[in-house]
Amino acid sequence: MTSSKEQKAIQDQFRERMNEDELMNCMRCGFCLPSCPTYIESGSQELHSPRGRIAIMKAVVDGLIEPDEDVERTLNMCLGCRACEPVCPSGVRYGHLLEEARDIIQQNKKHSWPVRVLRKLVFKELFPYPNRVRVATASLGFYQRSGLQTFLQRTRLSHVLPAHLREMEKVLPSAPTLKKMKKRPKHLPAQGEAKRRVAFFSGCLMDTLFIETNDATMKLLQLAGCEIVIPSLQTCCGALHGHSGEKEQAKWLAKRNIEAFEQCQADAVITNAGGCGAFLMEYDHLLKDDPDWVDRAKAFVEKIRDISAILIELGFQHKGLKLPPQIVTYQDSCHLRNVMRTSSAPRQLLQSIAGVEFREMRESDRCCGSAGIYNIVEPEMAMQILDHKMVYAEQTGATTIVTANPGCLLQMKLGIERKGLGEKVRAVHIVEVLFEAVKESGLFEESKDG
Amino acid sequence: MISEAAKQLFIQIVGRENYDDSKAGRLVYSYDATPQFQAIPEAVMAPRNTKEVSEIVKVCAEYRIPIVPRGSGTNLCAGTCPIEGGIVLLFKHMNRILEIDEDNLTATVQPGVITLDLIKSVEEKGLFYPPDPSSMKISTIGGNINENSGGLRGLKYGVTRDYVLGLEAVLANGDVIRTGGKLAKDVAGYDLTRLLVGSEGTLGIITEATLKLVPMPEAKKTMLALYQDLEAAARSVSKIIASKIIPATLEFLDQPTLRVVEDYAQIGLPTDVKAVLLIEQDGAREVVEREMRQIERICKEEQAVSVQLARSDQEADALRTARRSALSALARLRPTTILEDATVPRSEIAKMVTAINEIAEKYRVMICTFGHAGDGNLHPTCPTDARDDEEMERVEAAFAEIFAKAIELGGTITGEHGVGAMKAPYLEWKLGKEGVEVMQAIKRALDPYNIMNPGKVFAKSTRKRVVVTK
Ligand SMILES: Cc1cc2nc3c(=O)[nH]c(=O)nc-3n(C[C@H](O)[C@H](O)[C@H](O)COP(=O)(O)OP(=O)(O)OC[C@H]3O[C@@H](n4cnc5c(N)ncnc54)[C@H](O)[C@@H]3O)c2cc1C
Ligand code: SF4
Ligand code: SF4
C-alpha cells in the first residue's frame, strides 16, 4: 500500500523530475501499440500499452490522477523491453520516462522490512562488488555440486519455492569454482596481426555464472584480430539498479566504469550481454545533469559495441565457419535490438556458418518475458509471453535457439524445459555457437588459450 | 454519474472482468490522437457480442448515460473523447473476421478487427481491400467506417464508404438492425448503410460489417518525383489528373515533412528538395508501364528535378511506410502538433498550397504540408506548443484563414478525419443552417435522449475555434 502521504510526495516529484517535453512529444497516434507485448498479451488493454503508460505518467504530472496502486501496477507490468521506441515516428524515449517514473516511486515508497533488507543486500551490498558476486556464485556451485540440490529436488523440499522459481533453478548453468572465477586475464594479445585494441566489459553474471561464454568471447575477439584489455576496476553496469528504481546507485556505478575504461585507451568497449550493453550505452543520459561527467560519459558511450557488431566490422563472416548440419533460429535481445539497434549482425554471423540452416522465428523481435528480473516479479505475464514464444520457436523446427543476453538465454532454456523439448532443442548464447564453429573449422589455436 | 443500480446491471451484462471504473482504467480512455482534448469517462466496458451491446444500450437509455464507442482511439477530431462523461465501449472482444466469401467477393467482420489484419488476410486469398488509412496497423474497421476513412489508395479506389455493403447496428433504443448485405444491387428503401458510414458513433453502434473486396491488381509500380518548387509539384498533380490518368496513389510531402520522416525512417529520402510526389499505379502490367511513363513525362515537363522508380517491392514498401509515418514524425518537432484536413477540388491544389504558405508567413507560424494531393486532401500541420498562449492564438487565426480559403476554393473543412468535437463549430460553415438542421432532425429521430456519442458533430455554439479550446 502506498499511503496518501507517499502519494503526495510521488506526485510532487513527478512534477519536478519528469521530462514534460518528452511526455508531450507523444502525440497518441497508437503506432506503438501492436509492438507492445503487454498490450497484446493483456488482450489489448490500453492500460498496459506504451501510449496508456505515457498518458498515466502525464496525468500524474498534471494532477489528473493520484499515483495509486493501479498506476504503480501498470508501470510494474511494463517489461521495459522498449519495443515501443524504434516504431515511434515521434521519437518518444519511453525508456527514459519509465526509468524516471520507477525511480520516483521506489524512492518515495516505504517497503516492508524484508523487502527493504533484500533490496539493500542485492543492490548495495552484492552487485557493486565483483568479489562478492563471485562468492555468491560459488555458493551456488557448492549447492549444486554438494548434492544438496539433488537432495532438495528429490525430496521435493525445493517445493517450498514458488513454481516458477523452482523451474528457474533447474535451468541455471553449473556455477564455476571460486578459484576459476578469481583467475581472470587482464590483457590478451591478438591472434596474428592486431587490427584493433579493444576493452572488454565482463559483466557480473557473465563473468561468473556464464564464465565460459566470456572466455569464448575473448577468444573470438583475439581471432578477429583484437588486442584485449580487461580493466580490473570495472564493476556492474547498473542496469538492474537503473531499472528497479535505484538510480543514484546506478550513477555511482556508471562513474566507476567510465573511470576504469578511460584508462585503457581502447578503440572500442565490447559487451556480450545486450542488457548491459544498452545500459552502458545510455550513461550519457544517466549522467546528463552532472556537468563534470556528461562529456566523459559521451566519449565512453561512443565506444560501446556488441560482440556481434564488432565481429561483422572485422569481417568474421568471411572466416569460412562450419558446423554439423542443424536448423538455427535467433531470439533478439530486446535491448540489443531496440537500444543498441543491433539486429542484423547476429543473423548475418549465423547465416555465414556452413551447415547452419537459419530460419527466422515469427515475432523473433518480441520480448521473451525475461526482462531483467521481470520473470521473477511478474511470473504470470512472463510465462504467458514465454509460452507464446515457444510455440513459434517450435514451428521453426530449430534445434538450436540462439540468444545474445544471459537473461534471455535462461528464459529460453526455461521455455524449452516447460515445453518438454529438452531432448531435441538447446538454447545457446551466440558466442557459444560461433566458438563451436571456430573449433569445428580448425581455426582455433589451443596455445593462445588465455 | 452512473448509479449503483446501473453499475450492477452493467456488470450482470458484461461480467465483472469487462467492467472497469478504476481511476487508471478510465484515464487511459480519456483521450484520442487529437491534441488538447481530454475527458475522463465514468466507466469502460468491453461487451462480447451484439446482444450484450444491445442490453448495455437499453440500460444507458433508461438511465440517460452517454455512450462513446471506441476502436483504437486514433481519430483526429476528438471523436472518442468522452466530453460529456458516460461510458466508453470497447470492441476488443469483438475482433474476429467472420468470413471471407471468395464467391461473392465480400468479407464479414466484427468492428474491432484491425484494418491491416483484414488487408493481410484477404491478400492471402488473392483479394484486395483498398481503404488503407495511414493508421491502418492499429486502426479498427469500426473506426474506419465511422470516420469514413480514406488512405493512400483513395484516389483510384475511393474511401471506406465505397466498400461497405452491409451493416449490423445497435440503435439508441437497443434495437438491432441489419442494412444492405452481400447484394451488388439493392434499392429497397432508404440507404441506411450510407447514413451510418461516417456517422462517428452518433447514430448507432456498429456490431458487424460486410465489406466489398476486389481482385488483387496484377502489377504495381512506385515512383518518387522530386521538385525544387512547391507549386510545380502541385501543378503536376492537377495535370496528371487532367490527362485522364488516375494513379492509385498521388501523395505530396514538403521539405520539412521529408526531413522529419527521413529522420525517423532512415531510408535515404531526398531532404534537399522542396517537395516530392509519391506516385503509384497498379493494374494490368502493360497499362501500368505505359501510364507510369506518361506520368514521368508530365512530372518532368513540370520541372521535376528528378524522377526515380522504386527498384524493388521492399523499397516501394519502405516509401509507403515512411509516408504513413509523416504525421507522427512531425510530432517530434514541437510539443504540440496540430493538423488539419482541408480539402479542395483537385484542380485547385496549387492555389491551396500557395495560400497555406502565405498564411503561415503572415501569422509567423510553422506549417508543414503533406497529404493525399491526388484527392485534393491536404494536411497542413503546425508544430507548436500548447503552453504558449500567444502563439496558439496565431495558430488559431492561421487555421481559420486556411479553412476560409478551402471553402472559397470550393472545398470542405474535413476530407477524411471527421467532425467530432473538434470541428463541430465549423459544420454550419460548410453545410449552411438548413443542412445542419436536416442532420439534427435525423439525429433527434434516431437518438431522442442524445446518448450516442453526445457533443460530437453538432456544436452547442458555432463559435469557430479549432485550436484554442479554453
Ligand atoms: C498518424 C495517423 C494517421 C492517420 N491517417 C489517416 C488517413 O490516412 N486517413 C484517414 O482517413 N484517417 C487517418 N487517421 C485518423 C484515424 O486513424 C481514422 O479516423 C481511423 O479510422 C480511426 O480508427 P480507430 O479504430 O482508431 O477509431 P476511433 O478513433 O476509436 O473512433 C473513431 C470514431 O468511430 C466511432 N466508432 C468506433 N467504433 C465504432 C463502432 N463499432 N460503432 C460506432 N462507432 C464507432 C468512435 O466513436 C469515433 O467517433 C490517422 C490518424 C493518425 C493518428
Ligand atoms: S509513444 Fe510514439 S508511437 Fe506511441 S502513441 Fe506516442 S507518439 Fe505514437
Ligand atoms: S517497454 Fe515494452 S512492455 Fe513496456 S510499454 Fe514499451 S513495448 Fe510495452
Image (spheres, rainbow, N blue to C red):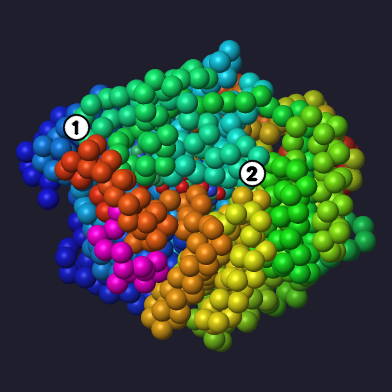
**Mark 2 belongs to which amino acid?**
Leu
Task: Give neighbour class at mark 2: few <14, some 14-19, many 20+ (Cα, 10 Å).
Answer: many
Would you name the residue on which mark 2 appears?
B155
Is residue B351 rendered to the left or right of residue B227?
A: left
Q: Give the answer, above or below, for where A60 lies relative to B6.
A: below
Does the magenta segment cover residue B462? yes
Does the magenta segment cover residue A196? no
Q: Quadrant of residue A169?
A: top left
Q: Position of residue B212 (x, y in %)?
A: 54, 26
Q: Please report the bounds of the magenta region as a residue range.
A: B458-470
In the picture, the disc for residue B173 is 1
Name the chain under label 2. Answer: B
Q: Residue at x 56, y 76 (%)?
A: B359
Q: State whether the magenta stretch is mostly helix, strand or loop.
A: loop
Q: Residue at x 82, y 34 (%)?
A: B287
Q: Residue at x 27, y 53 (%)?
A: B455
Q: Element type at marker 2?
A: helix
N-term mark: 2 or 1: 2
Viewer-side residue, A441 vs A44: A44
